Amino acid sequence: MKVSPCSDWSSEPCHSSAQESSATNTIIQSNNNAWVEENNDKIETNPNKTSALRSLLYGILLGSLLSGIALAIVLTLWLTSKQSTSMQMIHFGFCCTIPCIHVFSTVTTTIITSVTTTTTTTTTTTTTTTTTTTTTTTTTTTTTTTTTTTTTTTTTTTTTTTTTTTTTTTTTTTTTTTTTTTTTTTTVSTTSTTETTTTTMIPPNLLINPGAEDGIIFPWIDGGPVTARIDNGSINTGCHPYRGDKYFHGGISSTDSNSNLTQSILLLNDTHGYTEAQLDSGNLSVYVSFYELSSHLSSTIDRAQISLAFRTLNHSLISTTTTPTLTFTYNWTFQSFSYPLSVGTRYIDYIMIFNKDSGQHIDACLDDNSLKVY
């Protein structure tokens, strides 16, 4: 007898078997999928592990390099200063069950700079460079255990390794600027040349028409008794002018009388500029000069001389003085005399005196008369 696998009386068991078979297939399919995913995860995990290990290695190398640089800088500073103390302590331990290295570096540098200058400027520049390198490596390990009881346990272990390397570089630069101040003393010698100009004041001749060149007697006043004359050599061929064309002659006299010519000079301000204080100071003198000639045509000699009369403002006589006479002056002879000016003098009378010795003429001649007060 042939029995059908699924009869009416066994319909429930049949359906139950089918359901179990379907569930089993589902479980198998899930397990297969899980296995595939696990393999995929392993495939993806392996490159991640490789990358993490590479990063860890690079971090360690970089940290070692920076540590070496720091050590080199410390040695350089020690060699430069010639007095340094370097102490390095390396401590190996475990931080959170991860091996790590702590580097403690203490550098003591003493720089002694002695500069003796006039002006010293010291500039200190401190540069601090901090380089922090952080390398993070993450390793993820996933373990999947599959059982027939459809129980899946997934354990994920995440390991994070952080390596922090801090390098502190302290550079101390001491710049000593020496300024030398040079003081230049420039001595300027100034030669002061004092030019002394001595102005010799030549006082004017106070006489008017002193040599008879005007051709007239004025302003001379004839005092008689014989009249003096202006001559050019016609009266006596032995007499001729000393300078110019004319001179003063004693005149023609049939008696033994003399002749004279007088000129009165006012010394005050309006005329010749002297003040009363100057005239009364007692410091002024009178200077008289002239040229004299006596005729030699006879056996006797006629002579000439000058007389001065000092008078007040109202013409009162203060004093007189007369030059001496000369003998045998057959040629023009220069005569000069000086006398103190009497205090109170306001006028001076300049008097030419012609003295007759014998004959018809007074052959005494005068030329270039001069009267100066200073």
Image (spheres, rainbow, N blue to C red):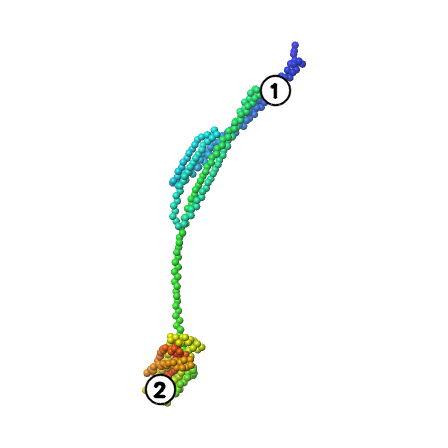
Residue at the outermost bottom position: 254
Report whether 225 appears left or right of 136. left
Q: Residues within 10 Å of mark 1 (few under 14, many from 20)?
A: few
Q: Nearer the viewer, residue 103 or 318?
A: 318
Point out residue 292 in the picture as x, y percentages from the top left corner.
36, 81
Q: Disc 2 designates what residue?
A: 356
In the picture, the quarter occupied by the N terminus is top right
Distance (Cα) linking label 2 and label 1:
198 Å
In x, y percent, where is residue 215?
A: 42, 83
The residue most toward the top is 1
Task: Say which element carries label 2.
Answer: loop
Q: Determine if residue 3 is in view.
A: yes
Could you say which disc has been placed on residue 23 in the image? Answer: 1
Which residue does the image show at 40% across and 73% down from the upper left?
Answer: 201
| Residue type, mark 1 in image | Ala
Q: From the viewer's perspective, tell me whether residue 50 is left or right of residue 188.
A: right
Name the mark on residue 294.
none
Q: Nearer the viewer, residue 143 or 300?
A: 143
Residue 238 picture quarter? bottom left
Residue 372 vertical position relative to residue 110 in the rendered view, above or below: below
Label 2 vs 1, first from the N-terminus:
1
**Point 41% across, 83% down: residue:** 220
